[in-house]
Amino acid sequence: MMGRKVLEPTRIGDKILKKGGTVLVPSRQLHSNANVWGTNHPQFSETRFAKNPSLARHSSYRPFGGGVSLCPGRKLAREQVFTLVAILIHRFDVRLSHGKKQVFPQLNVSTPALGVTGPAKDMDVYVELNQAEKST
């Protein structure tokens, strides 16, 4: 969620925002804008940003807030994810577990959220890790 101070009286539709007030903008609605992300926006698309690189700079893309409220931990979070993935694929052979049928995790759209939502219940992904063979 992002918060913004109203700098001057502003009309949005039939509402008037008073100077000095605060507007809260939930990221979820920005990230669900079909005009920006397409009609398939609820589905994960691994090629969405590769097909349209300008989406990463779009005003509706706010994974870490924006403006003066940009999350200071965003770079650390990214580096932690990259490090985990690098260690996993370097040290292990990683495969989806064949023990049970798995579907790609879906977002929890039934619980109100102020920001990005988490996965729905029972959307765990099971993997098998085997020690990678050492190359000489």
Image (cartoon, rainbow, N blue to C red):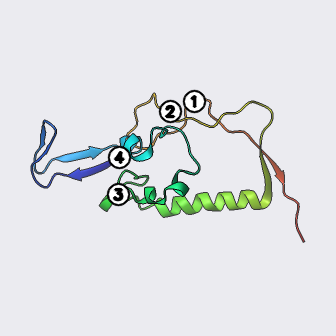
Q: Residue 99 lies in what quarter of the image?
A: top right
- Location of the C terminus by quadrant is bottom right
Judging depth in this view, the residue of 20 and 100 nearest the camera is: 100
The picture places residue 123, in percent across and down from the top left corner, at 62, 33
Asked which secondary structure carries label 3, the reply is loop
* Helix, strand or loop for disc 2: loop
Mark carried by residue 1: 4
Q: Which residue corresponds to the image point at 16% horizontal and 51% vertical from the top-left?
A: 6
Residue 82 visible here: yes
Q: Which mark is residue 121?
A: 1
Mark before the other along the chain sequence, 1 or 4 = 4
Q: Residues within 10 Å of mark 4 (few under 14, many from 20)?
A: some
Tell me the amino acid under the disc marked 2. Asn
The foreground one among 78 and 29 is 29
Mark 3 vs mark 2: which is more N-terminal?
3
Q: Are marks 1 and 2 in contact (CB under 8 Å)?
A: yes
Looking at the image, tell me whether mark 1 or mark 2 is earlier in sequence order.
Answer: 2
Q: Which mark is residue 66?
A: 3
Mark 3 → mark 4, Cα distance in angstroms: 9 Å
CA gap, disc 1 to disc 3?
Answer: 29 Å
Q: CA distance from mark 1 to mark 2?
A: 7 Å
Q: Is residue 129 left or right of residue 23?
A: right
Q: Which residue is mark 2?
A: 108
